């Protein structure tokens, strides 16, 4: 079998080479240059927001958001257990303490459990929410796989308890509400901060890169200042704050500007391919393709198949290895963050759905270039394999 269908690879069918070469020709390769500003403007326009700062990664975007949110050593930050670990590590960079809150069936944070944690495990003194004497400052909400978290409920709660909401929209560029109070709002522009990633497997890529936005444009300016070593003066080295070397380079941004031109087409293809998979798995009893939240238009970045564990006891590793032999690259959803060594002693709150899905979700090929024929092949092979593995 010579064919290989990757899980998720970048797509450079547009002006990528042209713009990167242009940046090279002009000699602007580092953290200054017109492509950086252009990318920031394109992102702001696309997201219908005022101000976006481009930075070096999604992780740095999240870290700068926490810094700007005022998260300090000893503070509590509420985080998800079932996502990529980079959503949580910046909490530790600030020497704050994460508490893991369960997800709902969208894989995103469960607002009911978030509420009951705030009401039952914390004390509200009218200005500060405290958990075991420590201030609860912020909540990191991840829009997992391009799904939208229940932001209406989460924002209501955040307002009530003065929590800063940091949206990890690294996987959800382009996902938006089409209904309800937040109609028209894009993932990453609803909370106090929104972080995006342009890593290799995200819906657009700059090789490595990210961006951050905030509900206050002046705050974005300050984030940009912090990301460029907090330099106050164009001529003299004067620094009033601790800065970071977190700025995106012009080379990366050149790639990003080209990718932004293609983003609407990428989203369309992801959505169409999702529908093809839906048709292919319709009525199949051993696995179900998970859908996205009603009332939203998702970028459908990653596709999730829920394996029926009553019928199939084979490990994810067995399933993944068997598909690999057929030239199909898949992966298991992440391991829970709260069981990883650096977090194993941290507090968790009512984790039920996160461990449930951690054992059942298989991510299947979702690159924008995947063909109809490949989708049929992937679905057929997965169905055959699961049927062979099924007991009873
Ligand atoms: C990709 C990703 C990040 C980190 O982005 P980088 O650009 O790789 O630093 C953070 N959180 C989630 C949920 C991600 O998927």
Image (cartoon, rainbow, N blue to C red):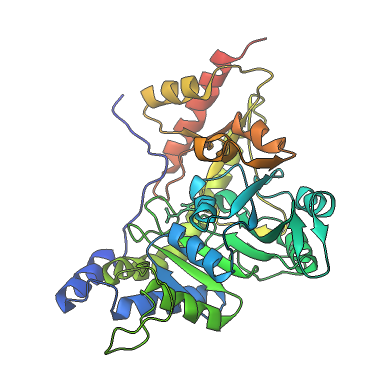
Residue 229 pos. (x, y %): 36, 74
Q: Of 271 and 300, which appears nearest the observer?
A: 300
Q: Is residue 216 above or below residue 65?
A: below
Q: Would residue 371 appear left or right of 82 to someone viewing this image?
A: left
Q: Is residue 17 above or below residue 368?
A: below
Q: Residue furthest front?
A: 133
Quadrant where the C terminus is found in the figure: top right
Quadrant where the N terminus is found in the figure: top left
Q: Would residue 368 appear left or right of 77 to someone viewing this image?
A: left
The quarter holding residue 11 reads bottom left
Residue 100 pos. (x, y %): 65, 45
Residue 140 pos. (x, y %): 61, 57
Residue under the point 45% across and 64% down? 263
Q: Is residue 134 above or below residue 346?
A: below
Q: Of 127 and 176, which appears nearest the observer?
A: 127
Q: Would residue 101 appear left or right of 84 to someone viewing this image?
A: right
Residue 390 pos. (x, y %): 61, 14
Residue under the point 26% across and 90% down? 235
Residue under the point 70% across and 37% down? 353
């Amino acid at each position: 079998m010579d064919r290989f269908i990757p899980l998720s690879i970048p797509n450079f069918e547009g002006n990528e080479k042209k713009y990167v070469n242009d940046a090279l020709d002009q000699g602007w390769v580092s953290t200054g240059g017109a492509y950086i500003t252009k990318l920031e403007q394109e992102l702001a326009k696309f997201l219908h927001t005022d101000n976006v700062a481009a930075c070096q990664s999604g992780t740095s975007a999240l870290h700068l958001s926490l810094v700007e949110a005022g998260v300090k050593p000893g503070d509590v930050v509420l985080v998800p257990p079932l996502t990529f670990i980079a959503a949580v590590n910046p909490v530790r960079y600030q020497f704050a303490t994460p508490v893991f809150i369960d997800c709902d069936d969208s894989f995103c944070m469960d607002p009911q459990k978030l509420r009951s944690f705030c009401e039952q495990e914390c004390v509200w003194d009218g200005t500060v929410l405290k958990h075991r004497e420590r201030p609860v400052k912020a909540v990191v909400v991840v829009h997992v796989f391009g799904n939208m978290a229940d932001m209406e409920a989460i924002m209501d709660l955040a307002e009530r308890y003065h929590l800063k909401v940091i949206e990890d929209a690294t996987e959800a560029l382009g996902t938006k509400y089409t209904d309800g109070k937040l109609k028209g709002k894009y993932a990453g522009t609803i909370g106090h901060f929104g972080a995006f990633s342009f890593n290799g497997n995200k819906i657009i890529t700059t090789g490595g890169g990210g961006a951050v936005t905030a509900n206050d444009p002046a705050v974005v300016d300050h984030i940009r200042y912090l990301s460029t070593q907090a330099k106050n003066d164009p001529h003299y080295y004067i620094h009033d704050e601790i800065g970071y070397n977190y700025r995106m380079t012009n080379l990366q941004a050149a790639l990003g500007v080209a990718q932004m031109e293609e983003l609407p087409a990428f989203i369309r293809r992801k959505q169409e391919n999702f529908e093809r998979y839906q048709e292919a798995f319709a009525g199949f009893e051993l696995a179900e393709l998970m859908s996205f939240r009603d009332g939203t238009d998702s970028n459908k970045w990653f596709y999730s198949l829920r394996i029926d564990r009553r019928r199939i006891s084979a490990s994810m590793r067995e399933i993944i290895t068997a598909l690999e032999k057929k030239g199909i690259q898949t992966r298991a959803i992440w391991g829970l963050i709260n069981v990883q060594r650096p977090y194993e002693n941290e507090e968790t709150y009512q984790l039920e759905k996160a461990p449930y899905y951690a054992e059942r979700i298989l991510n299947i090929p979702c690159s924008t270039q995947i063909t109809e024929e490949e989708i049929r092949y992937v679905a057929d092979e997965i169905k055959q394999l699961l049927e062979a593995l099924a007991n009873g």
